[in-house]
Image: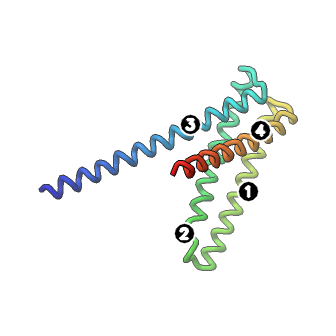
Amino acid sequence: MKKILILFSTFLFIFTLQAQENKDRQQHWERIKAMKVAFITQELNMDAKLAEKFWPVYNKYERAKMDLHIKERFQSENNENITEAEAEKKLTEFLNIEKEEYTIKKELYSNLKQIMSAKEIIKLQKLESDFNKKLIKEYHARKGDERNKK
């Protein structure tokens, strides 16, 4: 009976720990999203009227892009022991994902042209790149700090 209780307690602890990690990960992504919204809003000098039109369009694009990246990551897993036919199938699926990504970006630009100038859309593209570079730089700086503490 004691062993069962210890085993049950261990599973409960692991489950609780994993649930907390998932919650922390979700909060982390929400903080990044909020930083990105603030960054783009500020850098494009958006007023409330433009932001009200822009963010639903952009958020729809971001969700579609995230779905594609999840699909792509799934396709890139477990490639060690696949057959040539399976590899061919994965290549085809990868190319289809790339086409879909192009299509959703084209749709984004088309939708944004209804509310923004082409120059602003070009600036948005650069801002996305700048934001991603900034995130990577901060990540590496944090990883370096963690290594130095060890």
Specify the farthest residue to the top: 48
Query: Which quadrant: the N terminus?
Result: bottom left
Is 39 on the left-hand or right-hand side of 150? Answer: right
Q: Which of marks 1 and 3 is in front?
A: 3
Going from the N terminus, do you reach mark 4 or mark 3 first?
Answer: 3
Q: Name the residue under label 1.
A: 99
Kind of residue sitting beneath label 2: Asn
**Residue at x-position 65% and y-position 37%:** 59
Marks 4/3 in contact by CB < 8 Å: the verdict is no
User: Dot 3 lies on which element?
Assistant: helix
Q: Mark 4 points at which residue?
A: 127
- Crowd band around label 3 with a 10 angstrom C-alpha radius: few (<14), some (14–19), many (20+): few
Q: Which of marks 2 and 1 is in front?
A: 2
Would you place residue 7 above or below residue 122 in this image?
below
Q: Name the residue under label 3.
A: 30
- Crowd band around label 1 with a 10 angstrom C-alpha radius: few (<14), some (14–19), many (20+): few
User: Dot 2 lies on which element?
Assistant: loop
| Whole-number angstrom distance, CA of label 2 to CA of label 1 | 23 Å
Q: In which quarter of the image is residue 75?
A: bottom right
Percent of width and height locating residue 127: 77, 38
Kind of residue sitting beneath label 4: Leu
Specify the farthest residue to the bottom: 84
Percent of width and height locating residue 120: 83, 33
Q: Mark 2 points at which residue?
A: 78
